[in-house]
């Protein structure tokens, strides 16, 4: 998918990446962002899906403020962790935070939003939390994830989903009202076939949820007035202090990459 938000204004991949970069360089290390997106219970379960071994390297894709990468580095001192993101200002802040904690086993890299700056099979495992819906080309991103993941390695995906009941694209329209480069919250049925094509299969999964606010305004009011009541109930839409709150279900999936030969057969 190469446009921002189903039902939203069409944007090029470069426009989406630029919009995301500008927005997240502003907010990733803000107290509000950390408070809304931090979830210790979910993080604990997410880390539990990752099979981290001493002496091996792991990649956090769309690392943001380093929430997952830093957690892995703190817990697994014998492993090497990289955090990758387009938000270069946040990458710098993450590096300073790691240095302040004396974490020598984690480093952060900025990239162009398309091609990962690493060789084939570089990582024993990859993880991505709350970022995949910003990637302009899901197929190209899945291909890059497969390319840098070693045969037999893992990929853990954590991202909000569009539930089957939302056949009007409400959540994508809601999300696209903020100019942060949102593309699409994928349905669970979309994600598995996508990664199957690149030699991954589902090994474990669990669901969690995230609730966050948006500053209200006429655009939100119009969208809410047009939505079906059952849709508003499905997302537990609420209002408080001029803000509109929404609750999303989150898929947390452990994918396993097949061996080289099997992986090549899958992509043919």
Image (cartoon, helix red, strand yellow):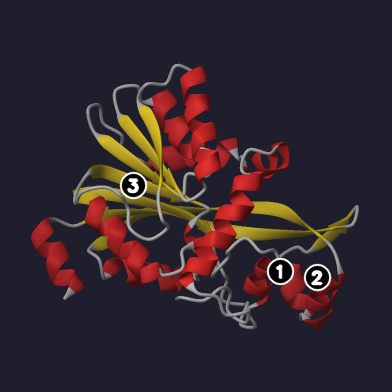
Task: Tell me if residue 209 can be seen.
Answer: no
Is residue 52 left or right of 162 when viewed as pictured? Answer: left
Query: In 3D space, how far apart are the residues under numbered discs 1 and 3 (Cα atoms)?
Result: 30 Å
The mark lying in front, picked from 1 and 3, is 1
Q: Is residue 23 above or below residue 229?
A: above
Query: In 3D space, how far apart are the residues under numbered discs 3 and 2 (Cα atoms)?
Result: 36 Å
- Element type where label 2 sits in the image: helix
Q: Which mark is residue 220?
A: 2
- Element type where label 3 sits in the image: strand
Residue shown at the point (50%, 44%) measured from the top left: 88
Q: State the residue lying farthest toward the left.
A: 261
Disc 1 residue crowd, few under 14, some 14–19, many 20+, Cα 10 Å: some
Residue shown at the point (31%, 34%) measured from the top left: 52
Q: Position of residue 132 (x, y in %)?
A: 47, 59
Q: Position of residue 48 (x, y in %)?
A: 41, 38
Q: Earlier in the sequence, mark 1 or mark 3?
A: 3
Q: Which mark is residue 126?
A: 3
Mark 1, residue position:
177
Locate the N terminus and report the quarter of the image it occupies.
bottom left
Tell me, yes or no, whether the two marked residues, 3 and 2, touch with CB atoms within 8 Å: no
Q: Nearer the viewer, residue 232 or 137?
A: 137
Disc 2 residue crowd, few under 14, some 14–19, many 20+, Cα 10 Å: some
Q: Quadrant of residue 203?
A: bottom left
Locate the C terminus and report the quarter of the image it occupies.
bottom left
């Amino acid at each position: 998918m190469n446009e921002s938000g189903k039902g939203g204004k069409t944007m090029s991949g470069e426009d989406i990446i630029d919009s995301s970069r500008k927005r997240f360089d502003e907010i990733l290390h803000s107290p509000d962002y950390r408070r809304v997106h931090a979830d210790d219970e979910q993080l604990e379960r997410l880390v539990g899906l990752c099979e981290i071994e001493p002496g091996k390297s792991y990649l956090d894709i769309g690392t943001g403020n380093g929430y997952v990468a830093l957690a892995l580095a703190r817990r697994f001192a014998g492993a090497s962790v990289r955090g990758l993101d387009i938000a270069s200002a946040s990458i710098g802040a993450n590096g300073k935070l790691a240095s302040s904690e004396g974490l020598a086993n984690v480093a952060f890299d900025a990239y162009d939003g398309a091609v990962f700056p690493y060789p084939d099979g570089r990582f024993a495992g990859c993880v991505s939390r709350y970022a995949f819906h910003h990637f302009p080309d899901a197929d190209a991103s899945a291909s890059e994830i497969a390319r840098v993941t070693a045969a037999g390695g893992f990929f853990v995906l954590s991202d909000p989903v569009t539930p089957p009941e939302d056949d009007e694209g409400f959540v994508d329209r809601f999300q696209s009202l903020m100019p942060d480069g949102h593309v699409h919250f994928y349905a669970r049925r979309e994600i598995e076939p996508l990664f199957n094509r690149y030699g991954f299969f589902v090994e474990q999964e669990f669901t969690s949820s995230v609730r966050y606010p948006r500053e209200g305004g006429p655009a939100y009011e119009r969208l809410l007035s047009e939505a079906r009541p059952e849709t508003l109930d499905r997302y537990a839409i609420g209002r408080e202090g001029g803000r509109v709150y929404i609750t999303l279900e989150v898929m947390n999936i452990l994918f396993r990459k097949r061996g080289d030969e099997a992986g090549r057969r899958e992509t043919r």
